Image (tube, rainbow, N blue to C red):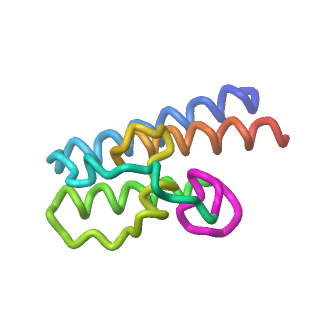
Amino acid sequence: MNKRKIFAINIRKLTAAIVSCLLIGSVSANTAGYTNAAFTPVAEKGDVTLDGKIDSRDASAILRHYAESSAGKVDEYTGDMLFRADYNSDSIVDSKDASAVLIFYAESSAENK
């Protein structure tokens, strides 16, 4: 199997795992309605971990935030963190943002090889 096909299969498996995790405890997130217009980001959109990279750790952090806020836990994300986590700019931090970050990471990783 060539590297691209293996890479595509791994991305599909990762996406399927994320979706299944979200479906197990699917409830609505309470992050809807914040506005990202008032924030000036200190890091690039998608870099939730502030390590200077957009990678799977950022997607994981976004999913963790989404799961915790969906479960009604206290939201510890600041306005700037919400801005960075809302990768698709729809004013809601959810699994779509995590998926978009993973797609960006996968594509940029493939380009660097």
Residue at 42% from the left image edge and 58% from the top image edge: 82
Residue located farthest toward the right when viewing the structure as drawn:
113
Q: Main secondary structure of the magenta part?
A: loop
Q: x, y percentage for residue 92?
A: 33, 45
In the visual, does 112 lie left or right of 58? Answer: right
Q: x, y percentage for residue 78?
A: 40, 69
Residue at 27% from the left image edge and 69% from the top image edge: 75
Place residue 68 in its image quadrant: bottom left
Q: Is residue 99 above or below residue 44?
A: above
Q: x, y percentage for residue 99?
A: 47, 40
Residue at 80% from the left image edge and 36% from the top image edge: 111
Place residue 15 in its image quadrant: top left
Q: x, y percentage for residue 47?
A: 59, 58
Place residue 69 in its image quadrant: bottom left
In the visual, does 81 lie left or right of 71? Answer: right
Q: Which residues are magenta?
A: 43-54
Residue located farthest toward the front when viewing the structure as drawn:
38
In the visual, does 69 lie left or right of 105? Answer: left
Q: Quadrant of the N terminus?
A: top right
Residue at 14% from the left image edge and 64% from the top image edge: 72
Q: How many marks?
A: 0
User: Residue 37 lies in magenta, yes or no?
Assistant: no
User: Residue 49 lies in magenta, yes or no?
Assistant: yes
Q: Quadrant of the C terminus?
A: top right
